[in-house]
Image: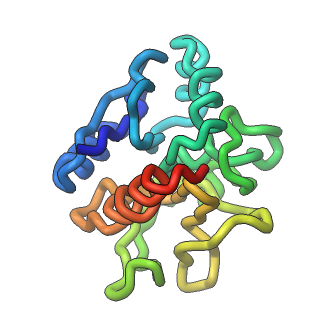
Amino acid sequence: MQRIGILALQGDFREHARAIARLGAEPVEVRLPDQLADLAGLILPGGESTTMRRLLADYALLEPLRERLAAGLPVLGTCAGAILLAREIAGEGPSPLGGIDIVVSRNAYGRQVDSFEADVEVPALGKPPLHAVFIRAPRIVEIGPGVEPLARLGNGEVVAARQGARLALTFHPELTDDLRLHQYFLRQIVGRDNASGAA
């Protein structure tokens, strides 16, 4: 059984844990460095990115996480998790983990009242479109040459991007009953990379 770590310092980690368990993998709540051992993959959930950054430092998780990412650990970052995973935060500088070559803008759509839902096309998942929930969502404002756009809004804006074993989403797939993106992460990223040893 795949053991999938979920950063559990703050945010909606419980919703991700339920999704992972429904797909037959074992969710492991990660709060301390030694809990990163023997994981097949890791999820960085949505929440408050500034709070998460502070807690990562407080719990001495930053360097161990960077080391695991450098060693090729597959990672899914959603909303605030995508901010942590990005190369850079627009107007602020380098992101804490820098695992995927994108630049994100925090709270780019506005405040909580400006949160919205939309159907997004995800060609890798086929039909129907994925119903996505955007809550104080970041915006992907720049994509590096090695990054593959996976999902777009109707206006063409990229809301999901993949680079090797890293997957960044600006929305919250764990807040709907559609498990296809979690399944994609487990099968196409965690499963493939573990089998091949690819980073």
Compared to 43, does 160 lie above or below? Answer: below
Q: Residue at x 82, y 39 (%)?
A: 93
Asked if one can make out residue 188 in the rendered structure from this viewpoint, the answer is: yes
Quarter of the image for the N terminus: give it. Answer: top left
Compared to 133, does 97 lie above or below? Answer: above
Compared to 112, does 154 lie above or below? Answer: below
Q: Nearer the viewer, residue 143 or 111?
A: 143
Relative side of 195 to 183, left or right:
right
Asked if one can make out residue 136 in the rendered structure from this viewpoint, the answer is: no
- Number of disc labels: 0
Q: Position of residue 159 (x, y in %)?
A: 56, 67
Q: Residue at x 62, y 72 (%)?
A: 149
Q: Position of residue 169 (x, y in %)?
A: 52, 59
Q: Residue at x 65, y 56 (%)?
A: 108
Q: Residue at x 34, y 38 (%)?
A: 13
Could you say which quadrant of the image residue 56 lies in? top right
Q: Nearer the viewer, residue 27 or 103?
A: 27
Name the colouring of the figure: rainbow
Q: Nearer the viewer, residue 172 or 183?
A: 183
Relative side of 50 to 23, left or right:
right
Q: Position of residue 12 (x, y in %)?
A: 35, 40
Q: Looking at the image, which residue sits at the far bottom?
A: 127
Relative side of 49 to 117, left or right:
right
Q: Position of residue 172 (x, y in %)?
A: 40, 56
